[in-house]
Image: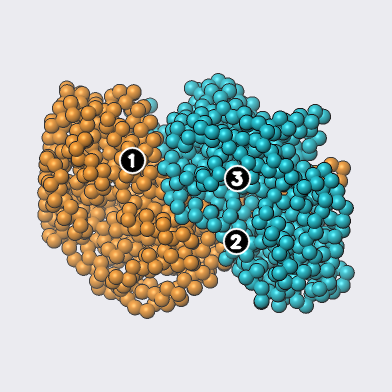
Chain colours: A cyan, B orange
Amino acid sequence: MTDASAIDTTAPSEAIRMSDRHRDNLEAAERAIVDRGYWSAYPEMPKAYGEEAAQAGQDAFAAYRDQRFPLDQPATDGWEGAERSPFGFDLGISYPHSNLDELLAQMTAAIPQWRDAGPDVRAGVCLEILARINARSHELAHAVMHTTGQAFPMAFQAGGPHAQDRALEAIAYAHAEMTRHASEARWEKPQGKRPPLVMHKRFNVVPRGVALVIGCSTFPTWNGYPGLFASLVTGNAVIVKPARRAVLPLAITVAVAREVLAEAGFSPNLVTLAVDRPNERLASTLATRPEVRIIDYTGSTGFGEWLEANARQAVVFTEKAGVNSIVIDSTDDYRGMLDNIAFTLSLFSGQMCTTTQNILVPRAGIDTDQGHKDFDTVAEDLGASIDVLLGDDARANAILGAIGSDDILERVDSAQQHGRVIRASRAIVNPEFTEAAVRTPALVALQAGEDEETYLEEQFGPIAFLIATDDTEASLELLRRSAREHGAITAGVYSTSDTVLDAAEAAAMDGAVALSCNLTGGVFVNQSAAFSDFHATGGNPAANATLSDGAFVASRFRIVQSRRHLPLGD
Amino acid sequence: MTDASAIDTTAPSEAIRMSDRHRDNLEAAERAIVDRGYWSAYPEMPKAYGEEAAQAGQDAFAAYRDQRFPLDQPATDGWEGAERSPFGFDLGISYPHSNLDELLAQMTAAIPQWRDAGPDVRAGVCLEILARINARSHELAHAVMHTTGQAFPMAFQAGGPHAQDRALEAIAYAHAEMTRHASEARWEKPQGKRPPLVMHKRFNVVPRGVALVIGCSTFPTWNGYPGLFASLVTGNAVIVKPARRAVLPLAITVAVAREVLAEAGFSPNLVTLAVDRPNERLASTLATRPEVRIIDYTGSTGFGEWLEANARQAVVFTEKAGVNSIVIDSTDDYRGMLDNIAFTLSLFSGQMCTTTQNILVPRAGIDTDQGHKDFDTVAEDLGASIDVLLGDDARANAILGAIGSDDILERVDSAQQHGRVIRASRAIVNPEFTEAAVRTPALVALQAGEDEETYLEEQFGPIAFLIATDDTEASLELLRRSAREHGAITAGVYSTSDTVLDAAEAAAMDGAVALSCNLTGGVFVNQSAAFSDFHATGGNPAANATLSDGAFVASRFRIVQSRRHLPLGD
């Protein structure tokens, strides 16, 4: 897959060494995206990072607080920042604010050398950036935890190694795409009795320009890295505009990238940070700049659609709101099913784009290994599973994390207005961070025919609906329709009938949503594994792209060829 | 590349036979898009099709005239058609006009069976369609000739085998994209001392829905086939809306596709024709229908931009107007250069999206193997080359074809208003078709600094500008800027200096336009060979896509996965 002959020998020697160092890892990643079995490049267990890593990470996070963030970016004309940990304290970190004209000019000027270094060298440099980020996973875990509200275990895994895996996956796709055909070719066309026409052709990978990554406040690295690294490795410069509440994880990322780029002999201005002043609306300003030719965005449907409509000079990849459903038809593991769903609803207080919102149950109830269960019993038993899961405060805190958004807190507080409350949301005390807003999920019973306006809208946060449908067929139709019309990133089904499972797969294909069947163990519908699971499909309103597939990377660069005649015999 | 195990054994047996029959050709095409040397699946010489093919093709074309076109499409509510050959006679053919609601409903209903047949079966059926189209290349040549105005030799090659090669190329890219990863996988994640998590995953290729192909009037098959076959092979249904002046070639194509689909056991309604009533504006109606999820368009910038802005429910691929340049710096084959450019300007009366419009020459002239030539001499010598090339009427007719557009005739008639006329356009009589409008190219001298408004706009048709620049550096800057800002599909450079050639390649990369260097023989800047040359880059305003690359096919389908646990040991 890696073609050593394609390395531009004019690339800086340190960059070539990086490429050599990481070649095996890149090739393994390129095999993994083909095979799609389990594979990971970065250990997900905190202990794998050595005995001193935990303390060093904590110290590094502490050192950032109440300081200017160490970023040597050009065109700095001020310092901005107003992050507050969802666990209840201000970070006090400020970041350089830059003059956009000057910053974008310097970024644009940096591109040709990066472009000319070629796919292999760029991939090597990107993998070196990832290796250094990986070594700082503990530091990033604290940064993610205290910007997003994720509890530490999740902040470590999802914000660290899992995000790094998603980055490597995107690099692997992009590298494979850039090198899928010969970089040079001899074209010899027979001309009957006359001598053949002979040409030499060169196929150059040319980036689009500056790429903009607009970060989200819940998974700044996991959702931000694929676009960032896919754009960078394909030769573009990348400007990272984090969500106001979650700057630090991406600022660390940008700082590492700049350090590695400079060491490799390239301009560090290939990766920069854009932090806005209060009310500056920098994301929309940047999104319509002519220099910006690629945008990756995760966030609200409103701004996502605005980008798609207005950033016409750019290729725009968006992940927006959706309504995820689970259809319950029947099960041979009633307890396993309830516990699995309870965990899904609770993890990070339901603040995942993959969290289930609508649980569709036939009004007449379901058959299980513990006999027939009517709708109300299923509702009550699911509530009880949540109670048990979150009954111990220490465990509850480790699962739920904290809620940093006032909108979500208001939404969960008013959840009872939607229907019959099975479980109200409950506040839990975090003994370490007593000001953290920690909430259990609210579970509300609705009627499929009556409450569409409520359940077909995304209720982001710890709110789930148990919806009574006419039958499983109606449930599947609702899953299909809500995915097609309102978007969905995940879907689940529980059934002991192969016919129902097949029908669910057909409904999922129609709704273009990934389906998980009969999850009762240690895998959850809201989890998505790099190199194996495609995150979002790009085929319904929840997202116009997948993390990652060929379409996610192929349009980030263009092939610009040149051809000339060869004398016969050459 | 072809994975026999992925064939859905529930697919109709005739379809599986088609897949078997064409497997070698598909695999060869998939190798060709990697190697990018010369390769072709379909002979380009008319004689290769047997002694009776020429007469049979002519007879078939004659039989269509003044008849209803034999297309058994459902929902027919009228017959429409008003084609007139640019060679001077009405075709008199009418085509079924369909009720859109009913037609789109039947197309949508046909998709699931086609989707479930899988990539290999679909590719086999598409290659069978191409094989039957190929066998009718003579018939298609007449259809293309008498709708576009191409002379027969070009109509045969560009409208027949070259278009078929571009179709196969798109199929090869799409098939490679659909099968680039495992269709099923076992995912086994270690859990330390506990048993591993084991899942079975299936990755389904799911089409977007109905794809719309909006044909152009100059190259209905060459420009239309890539999108048509890329969408069809990825599981979509395709509705073909030809340009009003060039219906017949695409109607024949649709008829062949329907015949093969039905024989293969699928609904023929996977491919349909949409012909509009006078003033119906069917293209814009179709483009915003919710069923339509993919659009391929070749034509004016105005409507292309309208599609990009308004067909928001669809993925939109457009090829629009551009301004193609050749930079002349110096040459060691003055005659070869002039003759090569003269042919480029003359072929099909300059009615190609790849034809050069602006020829940039330093005001002080150029060095050549025949000594220094000042600007006026280059201009006069190029005019003389055109005179010689087109001096013989029979040859001139075979090169120029006819002009079917009144707009183009008016444009060429008023070309002298733009600047100093080096050669006025000259009318030539076609003895076989005396009413045909046949015109030689107009060559007009302009000043780079003064006439921007003229030469930075596309003057589609037989009009070329010889533009005096300050020097070659200024010429390259103009090439770069006009490509970036106004679009370009081709660029050329003539120089004996490697430094200039390198600078031209850099300018071409910046402008994202394919470059041809020092063409003096039997290859022309406006020619683009399937499987080797990328047609357009998608990186400047002339097109947002390439024929073909990964980006052209990857977003026409989505991967929708399903996963379930496997018991340990499975």
Exactly how many numbered labels are in the figure?
Answer: 3
Q: Residue at label 3?
A: A243
Quarter residue B112 falls in: bottom right
For disc 2, the marked residue is A487
Q: Please name the amino acid that badge 2 sits on.
A: Gly
State if disc 1 and disc 2 touch (CB < 8 Å): no
Whichever of labels 3 and 2 marks the residue nearer the N terminus, that label is 3
Residue toward you, B516 or B365: B365
For marks 3 and 2, give the CA distance: 23 Å
Residue at point 54%, 23% (across, down):
A265
Q: Secondary structure at mark 3?
A: loop
- The Cα–Cα distance between marks 2 and 1, rounded to whole angstroms, is 38 Å
Is residue A223 shown left or right of residue A518? left
Report the residue marked by disc 1: B483
Q: Would residue A496 be seen by someone viewing this image from the given angle?
A: no
Nearer the observer: mark 3 or 1; the answer is: 3
Q: Position of B52 compared to B193: left or right?
A: left
- Chain bearing mark 3: A
